[in-house]
Image: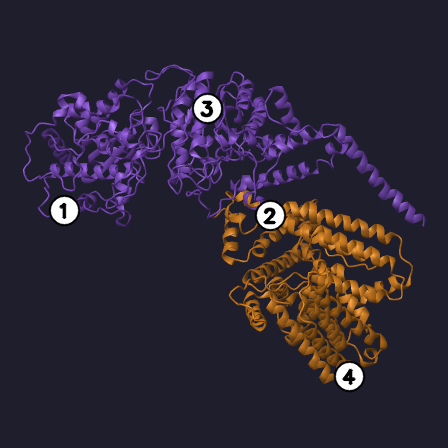
Chain colours: A orange, B purple
Amino acid sequence: MRLEVILLLVLTALLLRLLSKTKSYEFLLAFINVFILYYLQPVTSVRYLNFWLPSINIGLVIVSWLVITPREHRCSAKTIYFFIFSCILIQIFSLIRYTSWNVFVNLASPSFRVILFSLILFSSFFLFMVTRRDQKSASDFFFISLFILFTIVFVTQKSHYFNQILIKILRNFMGQSINTITSNDIQWFGLSYILFRLLHTLLDWKNGRFVTTTLPEYFNYVLFFPTLSAGPIDKLGRFNKDYKEFMINSKKQDDLLIGGKRIVLGIFKKFVIADNLALIAMNSTNVCLVKSTTWLWMLLYGYTFQLFFDFAGYSDIAIGIGKVLGIDVPENFDKPYLKQNLTLFWNSWHMTLTKWVQSYIFNPLSRKLRLSCPSLNPRLGLIIGQVVTMVFIGLWHGISTNFIIWGLWHAVGLFVSHQLTSFFRKSNFVHHTRGAERFLKIIGTFLTFNYVALGWVWFVFSDTLLSARTMLKLFGWN
Amino acid sequence: MKKKRSFISQVIVRAVILFGLINILTSFVPWLPVMMNMTFYNSIVPGRERFPFGETPTLSYNLSTDNLDLMFSSHEISAKKKDKSSYRVIVLGDSSVWGTLQEPEQTYSAQLEKALLSKEISFDREIEVFNLGYPTHSVLKDLLILQYAKQYEPDLILWFITLESLIDVNQLNASLMGGNEDLVRELIAKYDINIDFHEKEGPALIIENSLIGKRRDVAEWLKLQLYGIMWAATGIDQYYPKVFSLAERDMEPNTSYLTYSDQLQQNMLSIDVLEAGLKIADNAPIVFINEPILVTDGDNSEIRYNVNYPRQFYDQYRHLIKDLSKLRGWNYLDLWNLIQPEEFTNTAFHITPAAVKTLVHEMVNPIEQLMSNRELVEYEPDFNMVQILPDVNMDSSPYPTQSQTDSVKETQVNITSTPPNLSSIDYNHSPSYACNDPSEWYNMPVIPDYVSKEMIDIYQQGIRAGNHPDVLSIIGDCQSIPKVFLGPFEDKDKYNLGDYTYLQQLIDTFSGSWGEHGMARLGGLSIAGVLSSSKADKNICEKGETPLACELRLRRPSIVLVSLEEWWGARPVSVYENYLRQVIDTIINSGAVPILATKADDLEGGNQINQTIVKIACEYQIPLWNFYSAVQPLTSHGLWTDGFHLTVGDFDFRNPDSLDRGRTIRNLTALQSIDFVWRVLTNKPLQSGNN
């Protein structure tokens, strides 16, 4: 994301803050969220896709809410008004192509008739969903359908193979040549984080933990613009609490100061540190050109820190803008490279993702294993859980061999780290030897940092062979 | 409200004041040069071997900057202060010097340093050659760099120039000028240079020198330090595209140059910049080197050398510079047409790494002498070296008129399709009558018609001693490199023998030799060089071994073709004769049969070299290939306007146009000569019908 875009988001947040006391703040925030969604959607070479993708996002949000909300809350005037408002927004944005605003938003949209027809169709579905009775079987059906839909969407985005198939289908449908396919044909802005939020609400609802919200609240939670591009992943309940408080209570005076500081820090981390480190960060071009192992390590460390400052920078900006809008977006990083074991690392790196997978994958899986296989060795149960979790995280970044290996790398690392930590915790030597604990901390931090850094070798390249060769080269084998 | 005020006053106001103070302070304190000299280079990472310049920074790990402090601080020249034990050579010029499409170790400076060091000259100081070339044609830009480089105490300055860099309208084009306006103005004023540089508009704004005013320099400084890490890690400082467009060979029918359509006048050239350079250099000698340019043979090549230069303007420029050099006692080397067209890359100035070696070969002897400040037996102790080319008639077209051709005494040349009948060889047949009368040397037959019994004996002894009957060695210079001489005969698709199909047997027998580069077949190789161990390839030849000895040892040829044409006009021909005798003796002692060749040019005047060659051939009774006679009937006697290089032709012996070109005839008559000698030596007469 460019600096001027970030400054625009900051200005937008400041403007919203000024208007937070207005009655239509919810709708205003929704408008801004939708605008940002369309504005930041990259132009794609498949015709009209940069209009449909944000529109589908909006549709998914509304449908998800309809699935998880009880009938008594669904059938309200506010819901209908908001839905109509959303449709009008979509229609307005589609008409921008006919105005000079198109330069600003750069939207290629289908014809008015096509959009109108789609909206009519969707409205019919909306009406059906609003008025349907709450039946468990129907709810289960919708839940599974949505889940399958999310999975399909996710796989077609993250897997190169399926992505190409989808692009061919879409191009054929649009009458475009399939000879000019590129891997960048579909770039779906915000999809990953939107899916995380939708899944979180769906799963919580399935588990009976869901707290009912209004459609505007849900809409603004899922599409909250500061956190669309790179998280953090917030939880609905926590978000709503801040959201409602911000609209009702007077604004906290230090919100601006704290938020401003975080934004400045984030900009510094991203545009000063990360962007300059990118010049010396390992990539698939320079890795083949490096002359010696020492310099290769330098490049690896360059990438290690570039990745951190880039991601942490964006998180700081998101947290800062969130703060300006009265939302305490959760922290995502807590000095991860200074942690003395891998468990602590994962508790301080992309913390919101870790918590999400812990809540929705690791814990349920571990519980399931314990209940269904009581005789299963706890260590085995642990490693299964860790492997599944970390491989999921890897696959979330992309469905490829390298990301699977990266996930496994960390799964094994976590298991070993866990075992070592348990061992040393019980060791008398550590407890009774002066300085041993401190020494172990230093060694642990050093080893954890380098283990994580080496893991990035699988992360940075798409070619497994290149990653393997680089790994060998790092240890002196050319 | 209190808290809000407190936030605004405590944070925002203070931040603004602090920022303002920093900028005001930096406006008055000369902080920028200090910062630009704080660098990773020459400490954490090695200094760059050429100035930072990069049009694709992310691929070249390099960027372009106008800041001279930054340019020099990142360069290896600022690694350490010069001490008395080092001899510093700096090379100035444009992108051809900087090394576009060349790796750092392939540039003029790197190759020159390598060549000077490998010569093992008796020199009491450590030689360092630094590349201070920078892309864009402008001698004023070079002067700016020279002015700055003075602090590094160069001992010798090699300044590559060309018409583009000297023409007045180009002087201010370099971006370096715009980024160093004050320095440029100072130079112009101090040395009274006749260049119209606009006066500064109004007084400098305070903010110009502040942190915010110089933010671009700061950003470049930071990026260049980081790129230094990539430079150290990869050795890459330039993006090398896999594919690039070659310089245009076909040109528009246009005789104008830039905005000029009339004659070139001296006042159009920034000669005063060169004079300013001489003043700045002070005691350090400057050698001005007219850099090689592409001389094409494409469309409209009769009026233009290349897309940059119409012939008329360029010839006038050369004439002017040559005269000025003589008049003012400048050291001047004219290498304008040294490099063959095939060795140029994407512009009319950029050459391949192989061509750089050729260029350096040409430069190294005079430079070595200038460095050593000593006299050589074969060289006049004159440090105002001027390599004089034959007076070329600037008003003439490239090709002489019929009357001019007729006025040259022509030999009856008889290049036939069939060699003489070899069914009976009379070994008592005496050599050509021309051997008895040196003045008739040009009447020697083009193709030898005689092989002495001595040579046959030498051949047979050589074969018994282990020489290969199917290996031929070629000892020669740039006119004999495989690409232009005999090399294409390795590939049937690259030649057509036409009526000379009988030569196929020879071609097949010596397959592998035609394209072999060999140890003594190199551009720039002279007869002295062939006998100098410093010219030998140190990776292949033994220590102290000369290129000739190395070639004979490694390849064990049975026949050796000797065609060495390069010679310094200033040296007496008797020295050439001494060297030639040594070459012939060495070859004969190895059991191989030499074939000597005359040359087409007469740069030394009076055809002294050719007479010497014929004299030696007669004395030793060596077969002689009289190439000089072969080219006399050709248009312009088969020579370019430089009077040395041959007119370019292909290897198609059916094509009458090609048979009027020096290069084609050279290849044909060489084959015929070798064929005759080989048939006599191996007693393989042509059967009737073998045509």
Which chain is indicated by disc 1? B
Q: Label 4, on which residue?
A: A134
In the image shown, does A113 or B127 lie closer to the viewer?
A113
Select label 3 or label 4 by which is in front: 3
Q: Which mark is residue B481?
A: none
Percent from the top left, x then y, of residue B149?
A: 57, 25
Whether A379 is drawn above or below A443: the answer is below
- Do the numbered discs 1 and 2 sit on residues whose CB atoms are within 8 Å? no
Q: Label 2, on which residue?
A: A281
Q: Label 3, on which residue?
A: B321
Whether A337 is drawn above or below B170: the answer is below
Percent from the top left, x then y, of residue A78?
A: 85, 74
Which chain is indicated by disc 4? A
Select label 3 or label 2 by which is in front: 3
The kind of residue on which mark 1 rests is Asn
Q: Residue furthest front?
A: B403
Q: Label 1, on which residue?
A: B691
Crowding near the residue tagged with mark 2, few <14, some 14–19, many ≥20 C-alpha atoms within 10 Å: many
- The answer to whether any part of residue B112 appears in the image is yes
For the residues marked 1 and 3, what is the alpha-carbon distance in whole angstroms?
53 Å
The kind of residue on which mark 2 rests is Ala
Q: Residue at x 85, y 44 (%)?
A: B11
- The answer to whether any part of residue A438 appears in the image is no
Specify whether B281 is left or right of B372.
Answer: right
**N-term mark: 4 or 2:** 4
Q: How many marks?
A: 4
Which chain is indicated by disc 2? A
Q: Quadrant of the N terminus of chain A?
A: bottom right
For the residues marked 1 and 2, what is the alpha-carbon distance in whole angstroms?
68 Å
Select label 1 or label 4 by which is in front: 1
